[in-house]
Amino acid sequence: VERGLPWQHMPPQEVYLRRADLNGKLGRRELALQDVDQAQKLEPQSTAPHLIRGDLYREWGEWAQAVAEYQLVTRLAPEEAQGYVSLGLAYAGAGQWDQALSSFSTAGFLQPSDPYVVLQRGLAYQHLGRTAEARQDLEAVAKLGPQNSLGAQALAALGKMSGGSAPKP
């Protein structure tokens, strides 16, 4: 059995990205951003540094910077839903619900059966007052049941739409 610290066996980019995430959670903003920059230098075409940097900006409530990072992700990997989901979350955080819906819809096209994507799209529809579309998406996710965290979120959103009485899954 080989012993040692777990990071000794990780690719260098992953070490920098994990450290960036930890530094961000500890409030060490500059160190977190430096770690992401180092990771990006190692693999300039990788989407991972942009996703982590975007996540950090999102955690810090810096929506425009988060949007910019996630837009880079969608340009580098237009076939991957994660970039569009993250972009949608940043737009939602900024209160730009039309753009959030567009991003979640693209993610839904790429991963139509992903309940997280369907939930986020349903919530965007709800914020835009598009009740029929919101209900359709939220009811689909609510079928997961209240024991599932996504199902519980969908049931809660449906409850708000119907004045407090969410349907049973």
Image: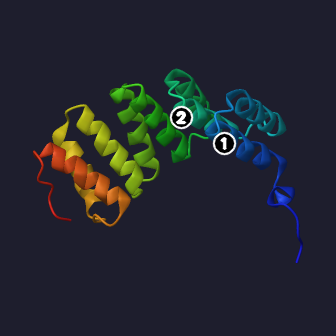
Q: Quadrant of residue 33?
A: top right
The amino acid sitting under disc 2 is Glu
Which quadrant holds the N terminus? Answer: bottom right
Q: Are marks 2 and 1 in contact (CB under 8 Å)?
A: no
Q: Is residue 40 left or right of residue 147?
A: right
Inter-mark Cα distance, 2 to 1: 11 Å
Which quadrant holds the C terminus? Answer: bottom left
Residue lying furthest top: 64
Q: Residue 117: where, in percent of width, then height? A: 40, 49
Q: Residue 128: where, in percent of width, then height? A: 25, 31
Q: Quadrant of residue 19?
A: top right
Q: Residue at x 11, y 53 (%)?
A: 165
Label disc, if present, on residue 122 of the rendered structure: none
Q: Residues within 10 Å of mark 1 (few under 14, many from 20)?
A: many
Q: Residue 95: where, in percent of width, then height? A: 36, 25
In this picture the colour scheme is: rainbow
Q: Is residue 121 left or right of residue 39?
A: left
* Residue position marked by numbered label 1 in the rendering: 21
Q: Residue at x 71, y 39 (%)?
A: 20
Q: Residue at x 56, y 45 (%)?
A: 79
Q: Quadrant of residue 38?
A: top right
Q: Residue 6: where, in percent of width, then height? A: 80, 61
Visible in this render: residue 112? Answer: no
Q: Is residue 28 left or right of residue 104?
A: right
Q: Residues within 10 Å of mark 2 (few under 14, many from 20)?
A: some
Residue lying furthest front: 26
Q: Secondary structure at mark 2?
A: helix
User: Which of the marked residues, 2 or 1, is nearer the chain's N terminus?
Assistant: 1
The amino acid sitting under disc 1 is Asp
Q: Secondary structure at mark 1?
A: helix
* Residue position marked by numbered label 2 in the rendering: 59
Residue lying furthest bottom: 1
